[in-house]
Image: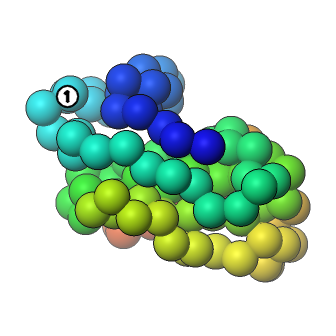
Amino acid sequence: MNLRRAVLVCALGVIGMGMGNALQADTLPDASYTLMGEKMFPEGMAYDAQTKSFFVGSFYNGQIQRMQAGKASEFLPAGQDGLHSVVGMAVNTAKRLLWVCN
């Protein structure tokens, strides 16, 4: 699955409004990303402006992938720590935390 910047800007804008954060399009990287795996089914997304990383969670199996500099990598394996399904995420930049709704 290939995600384009416009889709991420839209989705992250909605998440950002819900969390009270203002995301500006000029702060987002200009890239597209291919998610790993055939059963990713992305649901939750979050953006960390400090590391310029997107985090995408899987509704199907709870895996979290990190996208940075045009490449996806596994941030949290499927099912780790009892996480079975990701339905939302948010980055707490000050405390360097990734909040995940299961």
Q: Quadrant of residue 93?
A: bottom left
- Whole-percent x, y for residue 9 in the image: 36, 27
Foreground residue among 51 and 69: 69
How many numbered dots are placed on residues in this image?
1
Regarding residue 34, the answer to whether it shows in the image is: yes
Foreground residue among 52 and 41: 41
Foreground residue among 73 and 85: 73
Bin the neighbour count of mark 1 within 10 Å (Cα to Cα): few under 14, some 14-19, many 20 and up.
few
> What residue is shown at x 64% (from left), y 74% (from top)?
76
> Residue 41 vs residue 72: left or right?
right
> Residue 88 vs residue 56: left or right?
right
> Residue 49 vs residue 92: left or right?
left
Q: Quadrant of residue 31?
A: top left
> What residue is shown at x 81% (from left), y 53% (from top)?
39
Regarding residue 19, the answer to whether it shows in the image is: no
Identify the residue position indicated by label 1 in the image: 24
Q: Secondary structure at mark 1?
A: loop
Residue 37 sits above or below residue 77 on the image = above
- Whole-percent x, y for residue 10 in the image: 42, 21
